[in-house]
Image: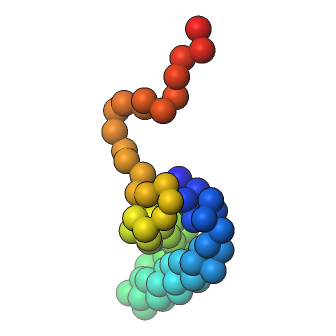
Amino acid sequence: MPTTAFNKDAEFIKIAKINILSEILSFIAVYILYLLNFGIIALVFRGLVQSILSFLFFLKGSKNTTLGRPMFGKEVFHIKKNC
């Protein structure tokens, strides 16, 4: 969801930097888990860690975009009923 703000502003370099940074940090986390004898389970956590890190980096970076930081809540007031 936060990537939409970067796509709208055509900030593809920022998207690439965030993806690269989250991949490197998730690799480091997997390597540490492997050294702690987690074995193959560490590979499962790579996808989870990478997804969480990229989401958090996109969320933090989307503050200065045209759309701004996304708001999460119960009410979806941007979608209107077409009845």
Q: Position of residue 22 (x, y in %)?
A: 51, 78
Residue at left offset 41%, top offset 57%: 69
Task: Point out the image quarter for the C terminus.
Answer: top right
Q: Nearer the viewer, residue 35 or 45?
A: 45
Residue at the outermost front position = 66
Q: Position of residue 65 (x, y in %)?
A: 48, 64
Residue at left offset 54%, top offset 59%: 5
Judge whether 59 appears above or below 80 on screen: below
State the image quarter where residue 61 is shown. Answer: bottom left
The answer to whether any part of residue 67 appears in the image is yes
Left or right, 28 with respect to 43, comes to: left
Residue at the outermost left position = 73
The answer to whether any part of residue 56 appears in the image is no
Q: Position of residue 46 (x, y in %)?
A: 52, 73
Looking at the image, how many numbered discs can be counted on the residues?
A: 0
Residue at left offset 42%, top offset 29%: 77
Judge whether 47 appears above or below 24 on screen: above
Q: How has the structure been colored for display? A: rainbow
Q: Position of residue 49 (x, y in %)?
A: 46, 70
Residue at left offset 43%, top offset 57%: 68
Judge whether 77 appears above or below 7 on screen: above
